[in-house]
Image (spheres, grey):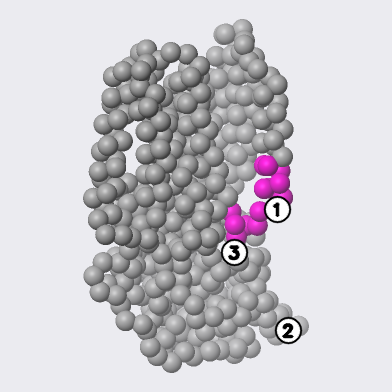
Amino acid sequence: MDSLINLSYLVAAVLFIYGIKMLGRQATARRGNLLSAIGMLIAVVATLLLAGMSYEWIVLGVVVGSAIGVYAARTVKMTAMPELVALLNGSGGLASLLVGWAEYHAEPVTGAFRATAIILAVLIGGIAFTGSVVAYAKLAERIAGRPILFTGQNIANALLLLVTVVLSVLFVVNPGDSYLLFVLVVLLALTLGVLAVIPIGGADMPIVISLLNSYSGIAAAAAGFIILNTVLIVAGALVGASGLILTAIMCKAMNRSLSNVLFAGFGASGGRQVASVQGQVQAISADDAYYILEAARSVVVVPGYGMAVAQAQHAVKELADLLSGNGAEVKYAIHPVAGRMPGHMNVLLAEASVPYEQLVEPGDVNPTMSAVDVAIVIGANDVVNPAAREKGSPLYGMPIINVDEAQTVFVLKRSMAAGFSGADNPLFFKPNTRMLFGDAKASLSKLVAAFKEAAS
């Protein structure tokens, strides 16, 4: 039986690896997700075959968890997906913490290796849990999305981290008689999770989500070492490594170092604030916008969170098809941190069957932006904000999509409200910018109707 279980774990691990690899391409992403799910099913069934399992509690957990999962899948909107991802990250961290706590009580802890695994699962899992809850609250706008700062914050965080590490080491040295230390580490980990995320501004939330995802994976791997479960170690290591890689990629896209993320405190502006932007806004109607688009030969679409709110991705695709049929070259410029989680815009555009080849990164489109006839900004704000080039801005140093260099810029927004970072956007007042106010889906539908009417 042990050989069968180990073989099942090996098959599950291989399916995890191939599944993740297939997620790298739009054409194979769905199959990759299915392969990973099959791998997890095999791992769960194999684990249930182990002797000494209490199936009553397992069945109860499966029923309750499945009910919550089905409810979330059917009711959570795409606009709330980032918040859901944050909560799922937190759930993974909490599960690892509880595994470590339960195993500490299950049998005496004697070896340093086992004690280290327990304290790591508890420490990292606790940080992932409360950090994810704070990230959820910021994304859901239950608390302010701006950085929450207080005097001496970095010093306080550093001291708290130092105390936590010292107590963790003391626990590992003498785990048998250190329950008080164990509880203190749990409480400090939960506190660190909160303090690590509150200083981070809303514009940097995608980085935080990927980092917390990595934390939950590392905590799961530690939990795997506690219960000696091979597939949990492999799955946790995969999640932890992929999350760290994604975090590094997104930090590079945001022009921030990984140390800024790990030690928090980034996302707030330093020094003086950029003065409120003043100028004359030039509004445009859908009918007038049509005539400009009809003559365009190169169009770049820049989607943002507003597209997700309006569920306008299908209207965007329809307009892009009409523009292509009219002889225009259409590309979608996707900023790595557009939306509220990694890959947010990619998911929405894939849902509308936008060809993956039409998606380009800022570094690829920026050098040719001055030759673009029309840039259409749909609900994006911070990722196209020219203030990122100015010292004192909360966005200073962040690479943006240089839509302000296009011949004409259409900005589709409901109002003149600032982005998630809270920074004013001088793009709205540029002489080549036209504001198309209203619901993005409705505005795009009017443009689509104008093209169809002209063709009939």
The image quadrant of residue 211 is top left
- Tell me the residue at 28%/33% (across/down): 165
Q: Is residue 283 left or right of residue 264?
A: right
Q: Is residue 401 left or right of residue 266?
A: right
The answer to whether residue 258 shows anywhere in this view is no
**Is 76 covered by the magenta stretch?**
yes
Give, as a single range, the part of the protein colored magenta: 68-81
Secondary structure type for disc 3: helix
> Considering only order in the chain, which callout, 1 or 2, is on the residue closer to the N terminus?
1
Residue 325 or 221: which is nearer the viewer? 221
Residue 51 or 408: which is nearer the viewer? 51
Q: Amino acid at mark 1?
A: Thr
Q: Amino acid at mark 2?
A: Glu
In space, the residues marked 1 and 3 are separated at their CA atoms by 16 Å
* Disc assigned to residue 75: 1
> Considering only order in the chain, which callout, 3 or 2, is on the residue closer to the N terminus?
3
| Spot occupied by residue 275 in the image (x, y as percentages of width and height) | 32, 81
The image quadrant of residue 325 is bottom right
The residue that mark 3 highlights is 308
| Spot occupied by residue 53 in the image (x, y as percentages of width and height) | 63, 15
Of badges 2 and 1, nearer the viewer stands: 1
Q: Is residue 422 left or right of residue 71?
A: left
- Tell me the residue at 57%/25% (across/down): 12
